[in-house]
Image (spheres, helix red, strand yellow):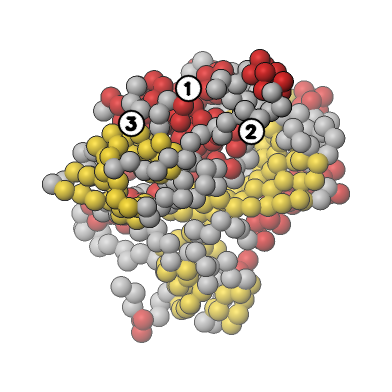
Amino acid sequence: MASLVPCPHCGLRPKEEFTIKGAALPRPSPDAGADAWLDHVYLRDNPRGALDEFWHHTSGCRRWLIVSRDTFSHEISACRDAADPAKERS
Amino acid sequence: MRYSALSILMNGLRGNRSWKPAWREPEPKAHYDVIIVGGGGHGLATAYYLAREFGITNVAVLEKGYLGSGNVGRNTTIIRSNYLLPGNNPFYELSLKLWEGLEQDFNFNAMVSQRGVLNLCHSDGQRDAFIRRGNAMRLHGVDAEFLDREAIRRMLPFLGFDNARFPIMGGLLQRRGGTVRHDAVAWGFARGADMRGVDIIQNCEVTGIRQEGGRVTGVETSRGFIACNKLALAAAGNSSRVAAMAGMKLPIESHVLQAFVSEGLKPYIDCVVTFGVGHFYISQSDKGGLVFGGDIDGYNSYAQRGNLAMVEHVIEAGKTMIPGLSRVRVLRSWGGIMDMSMDGSPIIDRTHIDNLYLNAGWCYGGFKATPASGFCFAHLLARGAPQETAAAFRLDRFARGYLIDEDGSGAQPNLH
């Protein structure tokens, strides 16, 4: 795991300041049906490679971020605010 | 050759020149009745019980590395059956019973040592939860004893009893729990399966699963195509990747769990002790090294190495529990990749493809489950129906709402 995380608000910060929630998945609409919700809550692609995750900068700006990370090399390729509308996640 | 005191004597008299390798290194055949993907503890145990219990010997175990290179050689060697929930407890108790007879059964010294597993508690609430778990175990016919503070002080006088934040109030002891030499488990199962005709093929990575007409016909591997009647996946750590080859998306994330061993010490800790503060567990190996570990690092990872933050956390927890550890030097640390399932419990089940079977999602609990996992998976493969103690480990339990969430932490794999 990279030791320093490029927070868009605080700059390079140590990893220990962050809390990791897990895969940044688009939330289905409330009426999307049981299958869509089963997929969202329980099923994971679990890739060996690039993965977008929700991280909370608990000991910093306290913003929710989306960190793009490689699950094998642990390299971080991007980090943006989860509310950043310019880069809507797929 | 059967190992015995006599065989040691006879081989010794012949200058130890006639020992044979414990298993063959066969070339893969074109076709097998059953192919097992993953030559870890569970895959090898599955092959062993398929051959021994169910008479299915035209079996191959495909391992991408060498035997024992994955989690069967990376755990902290603890065996126990101190589970609360009905879906879990009888299964782990079956496993503990199999451990108790395993060495005679597969004729290999796995150094099964029932030295006891003690879980310490530090608050009224934790004590009540432990007593409840102990009662549940006893209702299932499993041994459990609650020890008070003074009984623990007599047993392990060097613990930090009077820590201001986490005083030791008592502990739940399972005397039949203990440790096993993990490498010997892989070797014993491999040898036992090989003796009965199973082909163990190392350095053979599965790269694809070939299907025709809704059935699996075989696997593409780094050593060519191999056909099979039934395909069994037991590739913990990489279950999601292997299952994705058959178009499946599993309720699993891969996480890294670290373990540590200290320099060798004189006999010091004669049981397994776990600290209820977060998570810390320790035992002493027969070589004298203290073997210990903690929680997973908390982020998805396929790299078999961990982070320093968790090293620090584990060692802090250890020093809080046993202040005397402060001068002990750590010799090595390593990481293994866990299949963290969404409820913290495993999956042994059929899949949407008729002749494809899945054994996955072992979280931290894989090593202690090795014999029962192999036995139950072999039962499913041979009979087409689940073994009764593993009937709850269904893949569709997440859709049906029958989760087995021992921790009660929900669909958050990094919290189990």
Pointer 3 and pointer 1 on the same chain: yes
Q: Secondary structure at mark 1?
A: helix
* Cα–Cα span, label 2 and label 1: 19 Å
**Quick one: label 2 or label 3, which is nearer the N terminus?**
3
Residue identifier under label 2: B181
Question: Residue reaching furthest bottom?
Answer: A86
Q: Nearer the viewer, mark 2 or mark 1?
A: 2
Query: Where residue B94 is drawn, which disc sits there?
Result: 1
Q: Quadrant of residue A36?
A: bottom left
Q: Chain of mark 2?
A: B
Q: Are marks 3 and 1 in contact (CB under 8 Å)?
A: no
* Front position in the image: B360 or B397: B360
**Mark in the foreground, 2 or 3:** 3
Subunit ID for the residue under disc 1: B
Task: Judge from the rendering whether residue B32 lies leftward or rightward of residue B331; answer left or right.
Answer: left
Q: Amino acid at mark 1?
A: Leu
Residue B396 visible to the viewer: no
Q: CA distance from mark 2 to mark 3?
A: 29 Å
Residue B131 in picture, x, y percent from top left: 60, 26
